Image (cartoon, grey):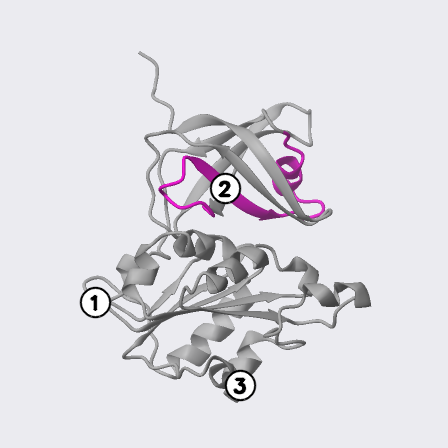
Amino acid sequence: MGKELRYTRQSVLAKKVWLDEKLFSLRVTKDPAFNFLPGQFARLGLSIATATNGDLAEEWRAYSMVSSPKETELEFFSVLVPGGKFSPAMASLSVGDEILIDKTAYGFLTLDRFPDGEDLWLFCTGTGLSAYIALLRDQQVWAQFKKVILIHGVRHASELAYRDEMLELIQADKPLVYLPVTSKELSSPELSPNVHPDLLQPSRMTSLLSSGELEQRVRIALNPSSSRIMLCGNPAMVTDMRKLLSARGFVAGRRGVAGNLAVENYW
């Protein structure tokens, strides 16, 4: 008998381009045996030609599931990295193309990392948003927390993928506060209709947290005893935020001891 494969072969069902030559999402088939918790990630594989002789070789990268576990398909959100080895190949996939998915789900941005709390703060930059969409599509987060605060950092407002879905949750009376944060000025006037009224720009999460403006805008104080925080995205943001939050009493859990901070490090 041959060795059992650690992955399954799945097919692309649909592609959505959020921003030309930069941001896109893929929906792919899902193996019925593939189980995961909202917030976890999968290892995706593609056969890519090598630079030396053009032979195909498998390349693997980690991508959080955007879809919730109850969905019958899997969804992934990606940024196209110019000159990259994996994302250009992923961006070139069309409906019907094959993608490999590891049978095991990974990751620690899951609600079971936390003891009960009152408010959940989700800080992310760019495609770090992925894991949080899965959380927000699942009912557990709304049952577990009185308020969920999503802070999504991007350079320009045109990069605010999944914005309409967040606004729909708010319109559906979900206890969600959605704060996009842009670090650069809008690149052109025609982008202004895409800006949410609560948009904080131009700024950075670290500055907003340090100045107290973030809590003033949300009208909720960050409290280590009642607030739970997740960080996902740019490594520099994660490092800087951890330092600021550590000074305020937020720490990641360790074996046998629950924390009030969870961080994903697959970048």
N-terminal of the pair, mark 3 or mark 1, is 3
Q: Which residue is mark 1?
A: 257
Image mark for residue 75: 2
Dot 1: element: loop
Q: Would you say residue 237 is visible in this rendering?
A: yes
**93 versus 110 height, above or below:** above
Q: Main secondary structure of the magenta part?
A: loop
Q: Specify whether residue 89 is painted magenta.
A: yes
Instruction: Say what amino acid the circle numbered 3 marks.
Output: Glu
Q: Is residue 191 left or right of residue 80?
A: right
Q: Is residue 119 left or right of residue 209?
A: left
Residue 60, percent across and down? Answer: 51, 37
Residue 77, percent across and down? Answer: 55, 47
Of badges 3 and 1, the one in the foreground is 3
Q: Toward the viewer: 261 or 27?
A: 27
N-terminal of the pair, mark 1 or mark 2, is 2
Mark 2: few/some/many CA within 10 Å (<14, 14-19, 20+): many
Image mark for residue 213: 3
Mark 3: few/some/many CA within 10 Å (<14, 14-19, 20+): some
